[in-house]
Amino acid sequence: MNPATATAASGPLIQPDDEHNRELIRNTHPRDWANPQPKGRYNLVVIGAGTAGLTAAGGCAAAGGRVALIERHLTGGDCLITGCVPSKGIISAARTASSVASAGDYGVRVPPGTTVDFGAVMARMRRLRARISPADSVQHLKAAGVDVYLGPARFAARDAIEVGGARLAFAKAVIATGGRAVVPPIPGLKEAGFLTNDTLFELTELPKRFAMIGAGPIGCEMAQTFQRLGSQVTLIDQAPHILIREDADAAEIVQQALVRDGVRLVLGAKVLRVERRDGTKVVVLDQQGRAVELACDAVLVGVGRAPNVEGLNLEVAGVRFDKTGVGVDDFLRTSNPRIYAAGDICSPYKFTHTANVLGRMAMINALFWGRNRASRLVVPWCTYADPEIAHVGLYEAQAKEQGLSITTLTVPLSENDRAILDGEDGGFVRVHLKRGTDTILGATIVAAHAGDLLTYFTLLMSMGKGLSALSSPIYPYPTQSEVIKRLANAYLQTKLTPWVKGLLSNILAWRR
């Protein structure tokens, strides 16, 4: 029996075992799949069928190369299975629940007793995830010219990989094995039982009391989501406020939104241990010297990511790695010049969109003598709370650390008509400019659709254009995008120095 088939047949690869997940498995790890027989050396072998691996393999095939893609679990990777897709599926449901709950503020009367059906929310997510999965499916990859091997991979030499008893020789390879949730060494955590993003989306029943450790992006998104879906969520972090990486005033807006939704915040707290008492989980905390005990029904851990380097036999391949992942140079080349890496396994930017770009970059650099540099990428990111926080480029503190003189402009959404009419006027748009110029060094947006609005700044930074370019276009009224034009106009107003105003005044006086 094919080893990949044996793995798939031993039990469900994802829970629950329902029609939607069975469809997902049929697409991403079919039980009857037989690995191909390798015929000669591949131009490229890719390990890991997440976003980076899919992009690298698909790009090679599109260029006419012989390419193999190896996946030990489900094609699509974290984004499809345990990350972007399922999380946004339930975030959208939670936002709808919040809209219903606040409908009275808009003069809309909702029948009393309206409730959230958590089982239906999760079934919808699984149905939509299965619907999206064909784009990452084994059959789709095969049709595109990719040889797909299902099963664990390990390097057998500096230019060969073993999978399912087959030996794949390669000219070049890409390691794109991604990462997994870090499990902190908290006494009693494993014994009590816990969830990470890898298991959270397998829930079918709503935890009444939900403790979440880690107030980073995952913790904040899921804390607000599960609170809106009906849990009583307590969010725990050692930091003094949530989203510690973001500007303090930006994080504060989201923090107050979580509090308004009913999330209980326990900040400046260290988790000492987790216990089980009469079927209940108890999180024991030290909050600034004060002992706190928190009873709950479920614990979610979201405190970081660890690279998937185990079992790859990287030493045999001559690939250097450490606890942060695989080491690469600016061209994504590892210590073995035949082997490149892409995505979460080697990048500090652990986002799907970054993995996509790095996968393409690794493929081009490996096969076509490319000289694309990872350091030249303009990388945006977004935390999908409500409101969202989106950022690109430098923060003010980073600019100061680099000795850069900056001009910072901020426009509140309370000055935008559409945001006021939508009831979404609690955020702002901020840009950091190189002093004396309109060169954008960084931007932060706090808004209901911050991730969409941020693209204006990302595009200009990628093209090497300045903020003033956003002043010329006509923006439809009323839209929240008009706040971008207002920010550009604010920059232009800084150019109206007393000398310039005096000159213009004299010209106008002469023309009367």
Image (cartoon, rainbow, N blue to C red):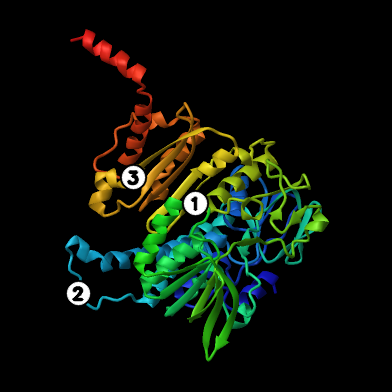
Please say whether residue 64 is visible from this viewpoint: no
Q: Which mark is residue 111?
A: 2
Q: Are marks 2 and 3 in contact (CB under 8 Å)?
A: no
Tag in front: 2 or 3: 3
Q: Residue furthest front?
A: 289
Q: Determine whether 479 is above or below 85 in the image.
A: above
Q: Determine whether 219 is above or below 327 in the image.
A: below
Q: SS class of the residue under badge 2?
A: loop
- Measure how far apart labels 1 and 3 are at the Cα level: 17 Å
Q: How many marks?
A: 3
Question: Mark 3 or mark 2, which is nearer the start of the sequence?
Answer: 2
Quarter of the image that includes the N terminus: bottom right
Q: Residue furthest bottom?
A: 278
Quarter of the image that includes the C terminus: top left
- Measure how far apart labels 2 and 1 are at the Cα level: 39 Å
- Measure how far apart labels 2 and 3 are at the Cα level: 35 Å
Q: Amino acid at mark 2?
A: Pro
Q: Residue furthest top?
A: 510
Q: Amino acid at mark 1?
A: Glu
Q: Are marks 1 and 3 in contact (CB under 8 Å)?
A: no
| Residue position marked by numbered label 3 in the rendering | 412
| Residue position marked by numbered label 1 in the rendering | 246
Q: Which mark is residue 91?
A: none
Q: Amino acid at mark 3?
A: Pro
Tag in front: 2 or 1: 1
Question: Mark 3 or mark 1, which is nearer the start of the sequence?
Answer: 1
Please say whether residue 242 is visible from this viewpoint: yes
Callout 2 environment at 10 Å: few (<14), some (14 to 19), or many (20+)?
few
- The residue located at (70%, 66%) in the rendering is 152
The image shows residue 141 at horizontal and vertical percentages of: 57, 56
